[in-house]
Amino acid sequence: MGRGTEKMLKAAKQFADTQYKKLTARYGQQMIDLLELPIRLVLSPFTIAIDVAGSAPRGFGLPELASKISFSAIFLVATLGTYDIALELGKKVVCQRNCSTCNGWQALRCTMCKGTGKVHYQVKNYNPRSGERATADCVAEAIFENRAELVHLPAAINLSVPLPSKDCPTCDGTGVMGCPECKHKLQVRISADEIMEPPWKAYNVMRKMDYPYENIVHSMRDPKIAAFWLITMPQIMGGFNFDEDVKQKIWWSYEESMRYDQLRDLVAERKPGWEHLQNALISVDPVRARDDPVIVKNIPYYKAKKALEAEVLNLDVPPRPQNWGEIDLPLKASSWTEEELKDPAKVLEMTSLLTAQREIADNILDAQWEAKWRQDKLNDLLKEKLQPYLRSVDKAGLPQSIVTRSHDQGNKTTRRRWFFF
């Protein structure tokens, strides 16, 4: 058994050696040339320049000066091409750092204020002194003396109460914050992945593309169009039929998703009782209602402002001052030459056009004057109405939604009462 195995191994070795020698003799040089091809491509600028340098003294049939000039030019072109290739490779090897958070922008929309630049705040752990009331001045002094804590509330938190606002401390009121992943990190990385663009990268980008369907979503408010997109079109494209129970479930899901849009349209009409519908709208989808411009956060202030606007609209606007406003008119008397004015038809044309132009300009100025006067009047009435309230706020204490006292003070009071008892 052992001799048979040795003979088989010896025959296999002889066969492998024979085949290797045949392959080497037939394809060896070709394989070597194929492996040396990348190296030859990289070194080709220098090899070409050296070959030309060896052939230049012979002159190519030209004088020696022309040969030297041609050699210098070829060597210069080869050197510049090599430097260009090296720089391109350097740009691909030394590239920008990949950040999945900001995609290389090194900035994000502020998560604290959601890009608005303003955040609401509350005063926590306020400890008033003996006989001190929670007025705005006293609270500000307590914050300065570290007897109270100023807490900024993120835009995602909605307490459904009117709160004061200030510039966002995270983004300094700009609405843009720095990327936390890129902060204090070198924005350059060394990698050979960018030398060749992988084919699956473009496929991943195409696969993640989100096509704009805003028009389709807007048209889905019509039940007939919604039935087409949800039921009819899948049946046409897919080649199958939905059962009645499946159609009913799809339609129930559609009606459930359209509840918010239907309530939103009713709230936007501002008919009597819209504030109750607004509460129902918030309960349907609190996350979407938080950033919805239709939602009014301070209903009493909104109603008071609308009442003032209606009052201002009913007021009679005084006549516009004589020299108020200025419009650059395109036509002037100098637009017609003296030769043209000798013709009575041209004179009539000039008079008609200038008069019509003046009337149009007066109408535009009157509309601007009316809008400006009503806006100034509204601002004056708002200031007049809010002034007593501001004075009362300065004298009276701030509401509990803005200033909350510390728990230690309540515990101290309780202990005193029990101790006294």
Image: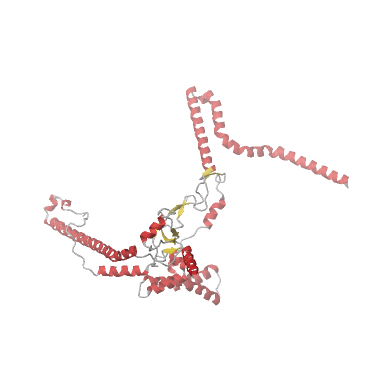
Q: Which quadrant would residue 160 be assigned to in this image?
A: bottom left
Q: Nearer the viewer, residue 154 or 232?
A: 154
* Residue at x 45%, y 53% (from the top left corner): 177
Query: Could you tell whether 179 is left or right of 363 in the image?
Result: right
The x and y percentages for residue 39 are: 60, 37
Q: Which quadrant would residue 203 be assigned to in this image?
A: bottom right
The x and y percentages for residue 172 are: 41, 53
Colouring mode (rainbow / by chain / secondary structure / one colour): secondary structure
Looking at the image, can residue 262 be seen?
Answer: no
The x and y percentages for residue 23 are: 72, 40
Q: Is residue 88 above or below residue 134?
A: above
Query: Could you tell whether 255 is left or right of 13 in the image?
Result: left
* Residue at x 48%, y 73% (from the top left corner): 256
Looking at the image, can residue 361 be seen?
Answer: yes
* Residue at x 48%, y 29% (from the top left corner): 73
Q: Nearer the viewer, residue 73 or 222?
A: 222
